[in-house]
Amino acid sequence: MPKSVVTVSPATVPLDPSGMPNDWILSGTPQTRSKNIVRSHDWTSNLVAWDCTAGRFKWHYTQDETIMVVSGEAIMINEKGEERRLGPGDIGFFPAGTSCTWWVPDHIRKVAVVKENLWQPLGFGLKIWNNLMRSAGLAGKSPI
């Protein structure tokens, strides 16, 4: 399958109604929409655009999720009760297995990279394998 670069504007990409479990909603009637933009070649990561209307809800992360807020804002309350406002341009990381409360005063739109977790020894082995392949000149070097 040929590889190609994918570009979209997360601010305007059309989204489809999604949803969340009713027992996660704490107040309001938050409505969510999302769009899976692209999946990585190895099927371990997805790039997703997501938005939500006003409300307060719990969110449980079963995969690592890194977000960047495109528009709107939300207050994140972590498991320790610490609050953090996220607005346009802000980035957040939510490790798999964690939960937080989201409070969206009006709306929020974000783009997220959602990543499957690998068993740690497998991930470490993959890292060593990739380094060996680069050292042997069998894989390209990354500038980062």
Image: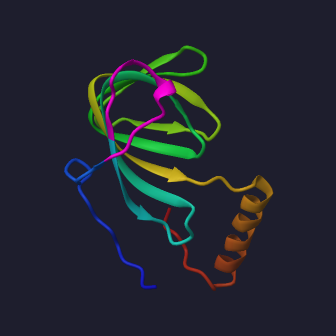
Residue 103 in sight here: no
Q: Quadrant of residue 30?
A: top left
Above or below for 87 versus 49: above
Q: How many marks?
A: 0
The residues colored magenta run: 17-32
Query: Is 20 inside the magenta-drawn segment?
Result: yes
Q: Residue 98 placed where, x, y %?
A: 61, 32
Vertical relation: 129 (above or below) 114? below
Question: Quick one: 140 or 124, which is closer to the camera?
Answer: 124
Q: Which residue is drawn at 36% across and 35% down?
A: 90
Pick the front one: 25 or 139: 25
Percent x, y of residue 131? 69, 71
In the image, what residue occupies the spot 33% across and 24% down?
29
Q: Which residue is drawn at 68% across and 79% down?
A: 133
Q: Does the magenta stretch include residue 59?
A: no
Residue 21 seen in render: yes
* Residue at x 42% of width, y 47% of height: 112
Q: At which x and y percent is residue 63?
A: 58, 46
Question: Is 22 left, or right, of 9 in this rendering?
Answer: right
In the displayed structure, would residue 48 be above or below residue 130? Answer: above
- Residue 32 horizontal/vertical position (percent): 34, 38
